[in-house]
Image (cartoon, grey):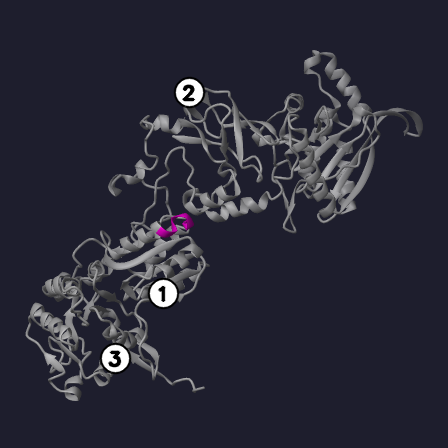
Amino acid sequence: MTAPAAMIELTYRDAIREAIRDVLRRDKNVFLMGEDVGRYGGCYAVTKGLLAEFGPERIRDTPLSESGFTGAGIGAAMAGMRPIVELMTVNFSLLALDQILNTAATVRHMSGNQFGVPLVIRMATGAGRQLAAQHSHSLEGWYAHIPGIKVLAPATVEDARGMLWTALQDPDPVLIFENVMLYNMTGRLAADAGAVDIDKAVVRRTGRDISLITYGGSLWKTLEAAAALAAEDVDAEVIDLRSLRPIDDATIMTSVRKTRRAVIVDEGWRSGSLSAEICTRIIEQAFWELDVPIGRVCSEEVPIPYPRHLEIAAIPQVPKIVAAAKIALGRA
Amino acid sequence: MVEFRMPSLGADMEAGTLVEWLVKPGDQVKRGDVVAVVETQKGAIEIEVFETGRIEQILVDLNSKVPVGTPLARIRTELERKAGVALAPAAPPASVAEAPPGVLPAAPRPSRPASMAPPIATLPSVAGRARVSPAARRLAETHGVDLATVTGSGPSGAIVRADVERRLTAAPASAEKKRPTGLNLDAMRTAIAAAMARSKREIPHYYLEHQVDVTSCEQWLTRTNALRPPGGRLLMAALAAKSVAVAARRFTLFNGFYHDDKYEPASAVHLGIAIAIRGGGLAAPALHDVDQMPLDELMTRMRDLVQRMRAGRIRSSEMSNSTITVSSLGERGVDALHGVIYPPQVALIGFGKVVARPWVIDGAIGPRSIVTITLAADHRVSDGHAGALFLAEIGKLLQEPEKL
């Protein structure tokens, strides 16, 4: 029996950097490329120091050419490397969408299983930093629509630290979405923390009365809402999806069958969103267990505004989550 | 459009045979009207409707046996008529909910903070159809619970699963309760056997008796009835029933249900009237809110009940939910009866026959009309002292029949 590992406190940003450093050390086929990941140290300072430690062969600065370097990553992966491509943010990933959707996600199928693309693509997502409409998208739900890839949304330092290695072991492309509001968040982590699974949702808070289902940056707002509800004698369960594709139906349905009520919190726009998909799955699989209509807290259907008060109003917030839960509980 | 369904007349009922329609398409019905007769293993039961409206369509043919919950007829409710809902048979009940959000009638949620209101689905009430959650609906179906008897506690009064669970624990013995009708005496005997055996097995009975001078009742009845035709005359049984109901309202330890190791007093007095069935058999259908009922109405109802009971016709709502029972064997020539409580009730009042006895009044002996009133009560709920006060109260009420 070993003594419990010491706990360290670190930021989400540090946890991702540690994860990248770890995979670079463990597997010589791993390399990282993206815009400003080397000399600048990463747009969100995630890769700071890695160039000095691992050299320009493995930490590669690219031109502003998302389609080009994503395609290069796909080719490298097909040829036996284990590349990590950083697309800076989901907003710019649209320029690489053809490579992701038409190439990375389809090559195994198109080649009759002769080639796979064991590629990891990381990118930041979400609003909240007053970066205005073109830099505040939450499009992970779009990517979760695509068969052939996996989509992850680490919300904790543990997942930020542990998902990358597991993703790199996957024979197919894995997209990792890092919410921009989480980079500065600190959390406690075992000093020897390592890989975690990437296909299970996790109940972050157990409760009897209502299931609050969320992921990524909204997890912490939802947990805060659950705490506020607890003060009003509502025992809310909070589910962190972690994986947006595939979705862990079993964990969701187990929870909803217990609470009979569900509210989904998703920073994506409501129409055609991941929240709509989860809502539908609950209806398909647990309709007869429900006591009330399923609620949703999503972003308003507008380009995310620049002014701070409007940006706050446009995306899910704790009072909205509390209000939606109360409606579902008949307490509104 | 509301569906009128085969009701569950007890937890053991799985199906019923529709033996008579008392309405036809186009007929107006109101809540409480008897619209059909259903033959169950316990006999023929008159089925009441819970909606007010017009019968649109009969869905089940005569003499078909259908499971509990099967739609028997479609009723167009008053609300729908006023709202001008289309008559098309396929009119989707949720059509309102499919309207674009902008035209939804505002749900009555005055306390909802407007600024933070998330655009969560809040379905407006669909006229005539009670809101029942899927979870509640399924549980009710599994246990044969008539949703019309369940009160909703969910959003906008919707029935949720917990409401059905409460209903289930509130009426665990309905299957074993007395059964009406003279049509199937064997089944009735089985039901009586089950209920009485359970009563004696579970209920620690105690018995009290009290002799009451009802001379003033007899005199008042003679005076009152002198002016009436035979069909409109009051009988002692009505005074007895009313006095018990009025006393039971005040003495809450005797009017209610005991289940799951807990006593729950009832909020109304539904008096079970024990009625002997010719050919053997016994039933105690309920008269509702007897404590509030004028004597003449009570008498009419009792006559009607006895008649229908003996004809084997009793209404679904009379089948269950009596909160206390009165048994009167008076005319059959015994002085007193010591009853067996119908579970989950907790008390039964017995009336013996009225006999002329020498009685001491103001130090002198004179002939008076005396009746022995007995109480069989559940010792888990009440004690002899409370029982004595309850019996005494009934005796006191009978001294002033004009006030009943």
Q: Quadrant of the C terminus of chain B?
A: top right
The chain containing the residue under callout 2 comes to: B
Query: Marks 3/1: CA distance?
Result: 25 Å
Horizontally, residue A238 falls left or right of residue B304, namely left
**Membership of A289 in magenta stretch:** yes
**Membership of B84 in magenta stretch:** no
User: Disc 2 marks which amino acid?
Assistant: Pro
Label 1 and label 2 in one chain: no
- Please give the name of the residue rendered at 70% of the width and 26% of the height, measured from the top-left corner: B277
The chain containing the residue under callout 1 comes to: A
Which residue bears the numbered disc 2? B25
Query: Marks 1/2: CA distance?
Result: 56 Å
Which residue bears the numbered disc 1? A223
- Please give the name of the residue rendered at 16% of the width and 68% of the height, measured from the top-left corner: A114
User: Disc 1 marks which amino acid?
Assistant: Leu
Query: Marks 2/3: CA distance?
Result: 74 Å
Horizontally, residue B263 falls left or right of residue A282, namely right
Indicate the position of residue B395 as horizontal and vertical percent values: 78, 33
Which is in the foreground here, disc 3 or disc 1? 3
Range covered by the magenta-colored residues = A285-290
